[in-house]
Image (cartoon, coloured by chain):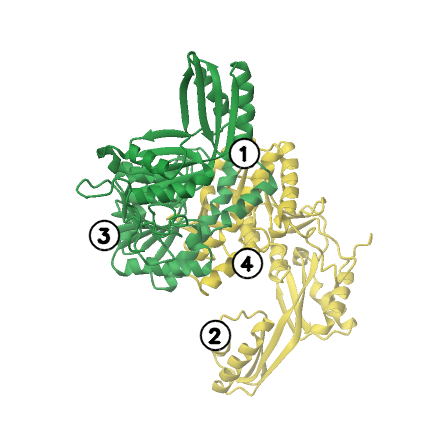
Chain colours: A yellow, B green
């Protein structure tokens, strides 16, 4: 049995937390499990280093910012190795460069091209624990790169794949993935397992337990991720390939995102290229457009509605107002008080009537649906923000997600 | 023209100091000088990292302590590169490992075996500035090592040799080497140049401006060191091969060390192996014995006197008292209030009567000499600590070292 354990910033926040992490690693090692470790910087450390760089120069040269920030994980890795030695566990820290993480040259958002880590395998064979700094690597010229925020999860999955590990255990400050936000629904269930596809949908909806990149990478290589807490000693959620043999609920969970604003352009002359004409300038301003709905409202006139992150709302409205004049649109409407609610589940592929059940449930709860968009394993509605909690509760109950033991 | 500039901890103590260092590097670069840079950790940073390691575990495993501490210089190097870019100077930071500093595997006190830095030469050829972290390298397996305290000077000299530089400029918080301590003798002279041999003697006497190791390395490769201030824009002291063509004073300077204690064992039976019998146990306790004088006082009886650092005095006395009983010595005497004063100068090789002038000068000043020891270019006396200032002033004047312009 071979595993990679990854510990994030809050799990290694200080000397005491690192001691606790060492105990977790030791427990695995003592069971004879070949254990490799990936660590993040202590929480706050990366921000401290970025602040130093910014004090020197805002918009500092990326190569040097990467080299600077990469020291954060290096400190954690060494301290953890020191503590493991104290506990009698032979451990060796490696920077991304030393571990063989070869990336492209896009500083601050590099992609991993290869992990050349035979020397780490040798440690595992000798029942030793290699500790690798997450979030970083080096390009073909040996220059230090970083993978961007959250890149440590991706480092861990990539290492697990390269080491042909049986599992990648990602330790964090939550117990696992829940059927919905337990702060809203007290009887939300912790999911024992979830498919990669579902996890990707959850992640893209702002359930920030795992980075989308790491899930996509694990999915392509069929690497199971065990998402669990470094604070509570209970099993978490296993993210893995869908298991067709298992009986399961139609819907896995209900997700939501309040960070939404809606913009509608009404009465645009209906001709080819209109959508591009509206959305192009928005994209050029690096604003991320999410749900898009287009409808022909009257003959030869179009309505387009889309959502943007709330922080980009003012700028997006400004752009759209200008564009609508050029396009001779009739009206522009905006609403900053909307939110997105989604039901997610691979089960809906094989079950008819899921969408209808969702809409009926919301209607019964008196919730007006403003927009609808669907994917293969997800149905999303845009509703008034004030009704988000009610919508989630109603859907959670309707789709049999409530934990009856609570 | 190609030079290596090295900046120590106080020269890069914070963002403002690093900005100033960047100006110095830029000035050199703008003159068309091929300029490589070696930096230390910001002052205090290495101690902060060591404290972290000690909090984890006193006597932390050396490999990991090295990896931890090495991040200190990495932060400085990146920040300096960021600032140089801001000033329009293309600069690239490298860790010791990246720069090609190959060392042996003695963690925390590694020796440099080779510097494989063709890629840094390429930067210089392209009129770019490579910045290398001092004090560190990596062994043949790519594991990070550190060179021990003060190793940054050695890094700089080694890099200058590898890059075939014309000079290694070491910037520090003093203006150069003085004929003696200016706090004691106000008319002490800053020396325009000093030979490697003399510098070694000064360094070994506690004039901590340059590490002994770096001077020895520079001497073997005939690499000139320009020791100068990063705070004042004046030329410092050039440490170089002795120049036989130059007319120079007999004595270059007067050094001293107050951190001395004296132990005498009287009346040991005179037979082979007695000195080893006394000093062996001291050496085993890792106590550094300095001046040693042995005399036959009476027939078949020996007196041995030696000095140790004052902090080791109590332990040394304890050991010697035990040993003296075994050896049936007559008496053990100790004195914690002694100090060492030395005159140094390659000129004394070709001048007779230097020792005599020294003793006469001290006698005239009413200073009693307790011990004498000589080397080819140095004469050292041990005297009562209270008389150190008087001795230095008298010798400085007697050997024509006073700066008459002050």
Up-down: is B329 above or below A3? Answer: above
Q: Position of residue A309 (x, y in %)?
A: 59, 71
Name which residue lies at 62% across and 71% down.
A260
- Asked whether the residues under the numbered discs 3 and 4 touch, taking CB atoms below 8 Å apart as contact, a structural biologist would say no
Q: Position of residue A360 (x, y in %)?
A: 75, 69
User: Between B340 and B157, which is closer to the camera in this rendering?
Assistant: B340
State which mark lies toward you, 4 or 1. 4
Up-down: is B211 above or below A311? Answer: above
Label of residue A47 in the image: 4
User: Between B188 and A327, which is closer to the camera in this rendering?
Assistant: B188
- Tell me the crowding category of disc 2: few under 14, some 14 to 19, or many 20 or more residues within 10 angstroms, Cα based: few
- Tell me the crowding category of disc 3: few under 14, some 14 to 19, or many 20 or more residues within 10 angstroms, Cα based: few
Distance from Cα at disc 4 to Cα at disc 1:
33 Å
Q: Which residue is mark 3?
A: B1
Q: Which residue is mark 1?
A: A124
Label of residue B142 in the image: none
Residue A161 visible in the displayed image: yes
Mark 1, secondary structure of its residue: helix
Q: Chain of mark 4?
A: A
Distance from Cα at disc 4 to Cα at disc 2:
34 Å
Q: Earlier in the sequence, mark 2 or mark 1?
A: 1
Q: Are marks 2 and 3 on the same chain?
A: no
Tell me how many marks there are: 4
Q: Quadrant of the C terminus of chain B?
A: bottom left
Q: Which residue is mark 2?
A: A280
Mark 2, secondary structure of its residue: helix
């Amino acid at each position: 049995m071979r595993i990679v354990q990854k510990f994030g910033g809050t799990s290694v926040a200080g000397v005491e937390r690192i001691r606790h992490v060492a105990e977790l690693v030791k427990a695995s090692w003592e069971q004879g499990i070949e254990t490799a470790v990936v660590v993040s910087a202590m929480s706050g450390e990366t921000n401290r280093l970025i602040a130093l760089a910014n004090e020197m120069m805002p918009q500092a040269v990326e190569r040097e910012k990467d080299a600077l920030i990469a020291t954060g994980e290096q400190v954690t890795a060494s301290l953890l190795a020191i503590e493991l030695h104290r506990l009698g566990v032979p451990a060796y820290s490696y920077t991304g460069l030393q571990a063989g993480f070869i990336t492209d040259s896009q500083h601050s958002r590099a992609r991993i091209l290869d992990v050349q880590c035979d020397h780490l395998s040798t440690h595992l064979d000798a029942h030793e624990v290699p500790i690798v700094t997450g979030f970083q690597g080096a390009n073909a010229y040996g220059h230090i790169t970083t993978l961007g925020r959250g890149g440590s999860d991706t480092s861990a999955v990539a290492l697990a794949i390269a080491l042909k590990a049986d599992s990648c255990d990602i330790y964090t400050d939550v117990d696992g993935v829940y059927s919905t936000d337990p702060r809203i629904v007290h009887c939300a269930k912790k999911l024992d397992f979830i498919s990669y596809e579902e996890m990707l949908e959850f992640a893209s909806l702002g359930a920030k337990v795992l980075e989308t990149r790491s899930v996509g990478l694990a999915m392509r290589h069929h690497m199971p991720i065990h998402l669990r807490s470094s604070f509570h000693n209970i099993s978490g959620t296993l993210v893995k390939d869908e298991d067709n043999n298992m009986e399961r609920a139609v819907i896995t969970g209900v997700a939501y995102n309040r960070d939404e604003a809606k913009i509608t352009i009404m009465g645009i002359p209906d001709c080819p290229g209109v959508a591009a004409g509206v959305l192009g300038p928005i994209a050029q301003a690096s604003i991320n457009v999410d749900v898009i709905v287009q409808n022909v409202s009257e003959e030869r006139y179009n309505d387009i509605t889309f959502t943007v992150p709330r922080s980009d709302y003012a700028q997006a409205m400004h752009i759209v107002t200008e564009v609508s004049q050029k396009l001779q649109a009739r009206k522009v409407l905006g609403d900053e008080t909307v939110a997105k609610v989604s039901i997610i589940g691979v089960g809906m592929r094989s079950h008819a009537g899921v969408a209808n059940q969702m809409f009926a449930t919301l209607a019964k709860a008196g919730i007006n649906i403003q927009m609808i968009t669907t994917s293969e394993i997800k149905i999303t509605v845009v509703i008034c923000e004030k009704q988000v909690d009610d919508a989630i509760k109603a859907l959670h109950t309707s789709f049999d997600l409530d934990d009856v033991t609570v």
